[in-house]
Image: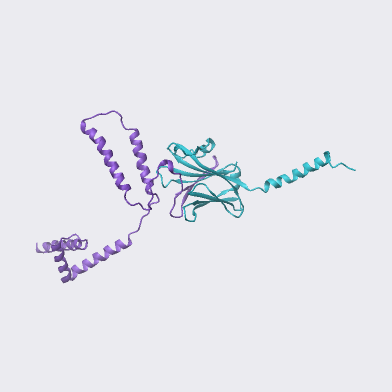
Amino acid sequence: MTQISQTIMKTETCLEIQAYVDGELDASRRAVVERLCATDSEARQLSDGLKALRSAVRANEPEIHVPESREFYWSQIQRRMSAASATAPTTDTGAAWTQWMRWLVPMAGAAAVVSLLTLPGREGQTTTTLASMSPAPTYSAPASSVIYRSDTDGVTVHWIN
Amino acid sequence: MPSLTGWPVLAYRCLLATLLLPAAVLSEDFKVEARLVWGTNQPKPAGKPFTALDDPSRDKVRQFKWTNYWVVNTVVSPVPHGKPQRVNLSSKCAIDVNDLGNGNVEIRLFELKEGAEPKLVKPVQHSLKALKNGEFCILAGDDKKVWDDAWFVILTGGR
């Protein structure tokens, strides 16, 4: 029983040291853990190890770049909304609360769109409309491709990824 | 004194033209037609001078899923030997073509950005004879700015 309680306490101490490294302890517990790390070599070793691991992960996290631009995702949202509104039922049905929802949901969506649009963009690009765009290849790195060939049709397509 | 006009002179001139004509034809550069095409399910945007892709060309791309193929721009370019000839298909896209001399034509696709050097996207090679015989060489890809659309650069022997 004593051994089990000692093991549990040690586990709790480890978790508390981890919380201390993550900055999740309140002031009183932080002071206790700092004193423990100052006096106990095992606690200090654990704390130092966790801090080193946090630094290594933060410094070496790979940056992921997607080839598509912000406009790509917004255009998808725009088209899906257009398609949904085109197939929406035109007759009013249901109780009064459904009529309230018909106004509240689009307004909430519009507020979300406005708030996202006002966030700083990656390249300061503005949203373009369908009428102003023309298609263009946009690649940040040398492109790979897949080749399709039809001898019957006399056509070769190089699809660039 | 023999006459300087009349049928012997005329016959001589016709013979000269017949002998020289093949040389004149052969010395002309082969021309390639490049069309920038937008594949989309959307209708033509209002105010844009796009035309629908002709039926024979549509048949070549029938395997693709899009409903509409709008020709954004058409350019005819000679295919020089040795030195690539660049043509701009739009403000964002250009190609250059070059007869490699080994029976193939090299087509290089470039991305254009204002204030920056043209960026090579992809070089491809295609048989010159095949292009002269009416084959299609198509470079294509997903439009990175618009979901579910695609761009095509359709190259054929110049008409």
Q: Residue at (15%, 69%) from the top-left corner?
A: A35
Chain B: give its colour: cyan
Q: Position of residue B111 (x, y in %)?
A: 48, 51
Q: Position of residue B29 (x, y in %)?
A: 63, 48
Q: Residue at (33%, 62%) from the top-left corner?
A: A60
To which quarter of the image does residue A4 belong?
Answer: bottom left
Judging by colour alone, the chain drawn in purple in this rendered image is: A
Disc tally is 0
To which quarter of the image does residue A45 belong?
Answer: bottom left
Question: Toward the viewer: A124 or B108?
Answer: A124
Q: Position of residue A132 (x, y in %)?
A: 43, 43
Left or right of residue B147, residue A102 in this image: left
Residue A43 appears in the picture as rendered: yes
Q: Position of residue A154 (x, y in %)?
A: 55, 41
- Colouring convention used in this rendered image of the protein: by chain
- Rendered position, B3 above or below A3: above
Q: Quadrant of the N terminus of chain A?
A: bottom left
Left or right of residue A114, residue A20 in this image: left
- Rendered position, B8 above or below A55: above
Q: Residue at (68%, 47%) from the top-left corner?
A: B26
- Rendered position, B77 above or below A41: above
Left or right of residue B9, residue B158 in this image: left
Residue furthest out toward the right = B1
Residue B130 appears in the picture as rendered: no
Question: Toward the viewer: B13 or B141?
Answer: B13
